[in-house]
Image (cartoon, coloured by chain):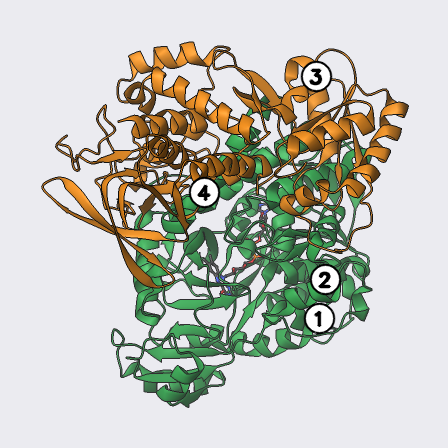
Chain colours: A orange, B green
Amino acid sequence: MHYDTIVIGAGLAGLMAALARAERGERVLLLAKGHGTTHWTSGCIDLLDAGDDPLAAIGRLAAEQPEHPYALAGTVALEQGLERLRAACEAAGYPLAGSPGRNVRLPTALGALRPTCLLPATMVAGEARQLADGRPTLIAGFHELRDFFPPLIAANLRDQGLHAEAAYLGLPPVERSHEFGPMIFARLFERTDFRAAIGEQLATLVRRGGYARVGLPAVLGVRRATEVVRDLQARAGALVFEIPTLPTSVPGVRLFQALHDAFLAAGGRVQLGSFVLRGEGAAATLTVIISEAAAREQRHRALRFVLATGGVAGGGLRADHTGVLQETALGLPVRAPGGPSEWFAPRFLDEAGHPIFRAGIAVDDQLRPLDAAGRVAYHNVAVAGSAIAGCDPIREGCLEGVAIATGWKAGLL
Amino acid sequence: MMQTLETDVLVVGGGATGAGCVRDLAMRGIRAVLVEKGDLTHGTTGRYHGLLHSGGRYVTKDPQSATECAHENVVLRRIMPHCLEDTSGFFVITPWDDPDYGDVFVANCRKTGVPVQEIPVAEALRREPALNPRISRVFEVPDAAADSFLATHSNALSAREHGALILTYHSVVDLLREGDRVVGAVVEDLRSGEHRPIRCAFVLNAAGAWAGKIAAMAGVTVTVIPGKGTMVAMNHRMVNTVINRCKLPADGDILVPIRTVAVIGTTDVHVPDPDVYGIEPDEIQFMLDEGEKLVPGFQHYRALRAWAGVRPLYKDQDVASDRDISRTYKLLDHEQRDGVAGLLSIVGGKWTTYRMMAQEAVDEIARKLGNTTPCRTHEELLPVPPTEAPGHQASATPRLMFWMGKPLADVEREHAYGDLICECELVTKARVQAAIDSGAANLDDVRRDVRMGMGPCQGGWCIYRTAALLFEQKQASGLTNANTNAALLHFLQERWKGLTPVLWGDQLRQARLDELIYVGLMGAHRLREHAEQGGGLVTDHPAVATEYVKA
Ligand SMILES: Cc1cc2nc3c(=O)[nH]c(=O)nc-3n(C[C@H](O)[C@H](O)[C@H](O)COP(=O)(O)OP(=O)(O)OC[C@H]3O[C@@H](n4cnc5c(N)ncnc54)[C@H](O)[C@@H]3O)c2cc1C
C-alpha cells in the first residue's frame, strides 16, 4: 500500500494532522506505538495559562518568541483546528463548550482550580464562577475508586471561598468484587440500573443538603457521557459535572475516540502497536519508515510524513544515561538545553519548569525539521505537537493548544 | 517550657543503634526515653545499603569487625526473621580483581570466624545466570538482605511493650550540665515548637554521624567523620544473591537484591557536615560502570532512584589519618575519658552490629545503675509492627523470613486487589492507614513504613491517594486540608531529590508523566498558598531538612 501521508503518533497532534490530510482526500496511515498523552490529561483543551484571554496572550507570545510552536503554527491554524475538533466532538454527541478568547477555571481532583479553555459540556457546571454563586455544591465519589477523593477536594474548594461539601456514595451491587479503575466505572455508568441506584442516592443527598450541583469523578460513561450526565441530573434534581480523576483519563479517551472516529470516517487507516525504528531517504527526502510490531519489521512508504510522537512524556524524545537526547523514530537532531547538570531545577514544582522539557526538534515555519546548522533535514516531513522545541507545554498550560495548532497546520501544508 | 520529664536513661538517636539501646534498657527494667529529631531511621539507618553482613567484607582490613558481623549475623537471623531475606552472598573474582586475593580471603574468613565455602563457577552461574561469565572464583557466605525500617520499628515496638517512651520529631537542642555531670537534655518538639526538659541519670548518645554534635552540647569532643556513601536502586532483581567483589573494600563493589529492586553501592567520601551533601553525576556513572563488571548489561536496566547516607566513622584521639579509621564501634564513657559523668556515646559500627553495640552500652549503664538483669535481646524475638500485618495480633503473625512473593501473597490472602494504593509495591489501603495511625508526621514517613512511592511510577498515583487518605483519617483530630497540601508538596519535593541523579530513559519519562499529573492534571502547585505545616505533621523544619547540594 502506498500512502500519501503517514502520520506517526496518535496523540492529539497526530490525530488532527491525520484527520486534516484524510479530509483533503489523501490516503493516510496513522501509525503509533500506543495512545498519546490524551489518556493522561484532563480532557479539556488548554490554550495558555496566561490571563483571561488566551488567544490574545498567544498573539503576544508569538511576537515575543518567534520560535515558539504557536508562533510557527500561526493563530489561523489554531482557530481552524479548534473548530474542526469541536465539530468532531459534536458529531460524537460530546459537545465542547467555551471559547478561545476566554479562560475558565475548573476544579481538579485535589480541589485546586486550574485554567482551561474548551471543556466538555459534562464539566460546565463545575466552572469556578458558577461554584462561587453562593449555593452549595456536593462533591461525591466512591470508596472503591482510588483516583478521586471528595473530602479533600471539597475542603480545598472551601479554602478558596467556595461552598462545597463531600460525600461518598454506596456502590450498587455489581458482578465484580475488586479493581475499580476509572474505565470500569465509566462502563458501569452507561448502565441504566447503575445510574438509577446512584441517582437515587444523589436525590436524597440533594434534597437534604439543598445542593445546586453535584461534582462527580469524570467517569460518567465513555461513548455516551453527555447523555449519562443529563440522565443523572434528572434523577438527582441538581446539575451534575465531572472532575478529572487520576489517569486513565476517561475524558481524554473520549477526545481520542471522537477524532479517531472522524478520521476513520474520512477514510483513514490506523495501525496501533507499531514502533517506528528508523527512516530511510536521500537528498533530504524521507521515503520509507521502518516500524516494528510483534518483533517483525515492516516498511511503509509515503510521499509525506508527519512526526507527532510527543516529547519526553510521549516517548518521542528519550535521554540516555550519558546525557544525550534522541528523537526516537527518525533520529532527527534534537535541540537540548545544555548537559544533564542543567536539565533540572532543584524544586520539582519550580515556577519556570525544568529546562530539559523545553527540548525538542527545531522546525521552520513549515514545521520542517532543522539540523544543527539550521538547514531543513527532510523537506517532506512536518513535526507536530510536543516534539517541537522551544516550549514546555505542561508548564505553559498549552499542551492541547500547541498540539492542535501544529497538528492542524501539518495537515494543511 | 513544658513540664520536665524524668527517666533513668535518655537515648539520643532513633537509628538502629538507639532503637536497639532503648529496647535493651527497657527489657532490663530500666526506665528509658528515646528522642529522635526525625522519624525513626531518619538518619543513616534509613539510607544504608540493606545488607546483613556475613563479615566477609572486613576479614582482611578490619578482622575484629568481621568477627562481630559473623556473630551478629547468626543472632539477627534468630530474632528478626521478618526483616530479612535469606539471599545468601557470593564473593566473586572478576577479571578486574587480583586473583591471588581469593586464597587470602578464605584464610582470613577462617581466622575471623566468617563461614565461607568456595563453589564452582558453573554452579554460581547456574544460580545467577546474569552474573558476568568471566568470573574466575566464587565464595559463598551467609549474607542476607535486611529491611532496616522494619527492624528499627520492631525494636521500638518491643521497647514500648516493655515500657519505654519513644519520641520522634523531638530534637535535642541542649544537654543540661550540673558541674561535672550531665543531668538531662532539652528537646524541641518539632510538631509544636515547644521545648521540654528531660532529666535523667544518663544520656546515651547514639546519634550516629551526629554524635559529635550531641557531645559538643556537653562540652565534650567526639570526632565523628561523616563518610558519605551513594547508592543506586535498579528496577530489576538481576540477581537474587548478594554479590560482592572479592577484593579489598572499595567503591561500587556490592550488589544487594532487596524486595523488588537491586541496589548497587557505594562510595565513601568524607563530607564536612552530615546534613549537607550532594550526589554527583560521576558517582552514579561510576556505580553503573562497576555494576557492569558484575552483571553485563547493567547500564540498560532502569535506575529507579539514588540516595546517600553518611557513615558514622569514629576517629579516636590517637588516630592520625582518616584512612586508618576502623569500622568497629566504640563505647565512650565520658566520665573516664573527659571527666564528664552521666554521658556515654556509642559510636561507629554498622547496622549489622547494632544489637551488640546496644548490649555493650547498656551493660555499662546497668552496671552503673546497679541493675543486674542480664541482656536478653539476642534471645527474644522481635515483634512485628502493625504496618506489616494490619488487623493481626503482632505475636500471632507467622515468623517467616521475607520472600519475594510475600507482598503478593498477602494481597491475595486479604483479597485486597481493589484496595491497592501503590500498585508498584503492592501496598494496600489498610497498610497505609496503619502507617498513618502509627503516627506518621508526613508522607515520607508513610513511604518509609510501607514503601509507598518507591516503585517505577515514582509515586504518580499513590502520592495523591495517600495524601487524601491522610486527610480523611486525621481530619477529625484537627488536620486541615492546608496541612495535607503541605504534606503533599513536601513529599513531591523529597522524592524529587532522590530522582534527579537518575533521570534518563524511562525514569525521565515517568518523571515527566508525573509532572503531567501533579502540575497539569491536579494543579498541585496552585495550592501553595493553601499549604501550611501543622495538624501534627512536620513538613518544614530545618532540623530535619537534608540539603542535597549540587556539585
Ligand atoms: C552508604 C552506606 C551504606 C551502608 N550499608 C550498610 C550495610 O549494607 N550493612 C550494614 O550493616 N551497615 C551499613 N552501613 C552502616 C550503617 O548504616 C550504620 O552504621 C548504621 O545505620 C548507624 O546507625 P546509628 O543508629 O548508629 O546511626 P543513625 O541511623 O544515623 O541514627 C542516628 C540518629 O540520630 C538522630 N539525631 C541526630 N541529631 C539529633 C538530635 N539533635 N536530636 C535527636 N536526634 C538526633 C538522627 O536523625 C539519626 O536518626 C552503611 C552506611 C552507609 C553510609
Q: Mark 4 belongs to which amino acid?
A: Ala
> Percent from the top left, x then y, of residue A386?
36, 33
Q: Is residue B29 left or right of residue A208?
A: left
Find the distance from the CA under tag 3 to the CA under tag 4. 33 Å
Q: Mark 1 belongs to which amino acid?
A: Thr
SS class, disc 2:
helix
- The residue identified by callout 4 is B511
- The chain letter under disc 3 is A
* Residue contact between numbered discs 3 and 1, judged by CB atoms under 8 Å: no
> Percent from the top left, x then y, of residue A324?
26, 46
* Residue contact between numbered discs 3 and 4, judged by CB atoms under 8 Å: no
1 vs 4, front mark: 4
Find the distance from the CA under tag 1 to the CA under tag 4. 44 Å
Find the distance from the CA under tag 1 to the CA under tag 2. 8 Å
- The residue identified by callout 1 is B377
- The residue identified by callout 2 is B23
SS class, disc 4:
helix
Vertical side of B341 occupied by A411: above or below: above
3 vs 4, front mark: 3
Frontmost residue, A241 versus B309: A241
Ligand 1 within 8 Å of disc 1? The answer is: no
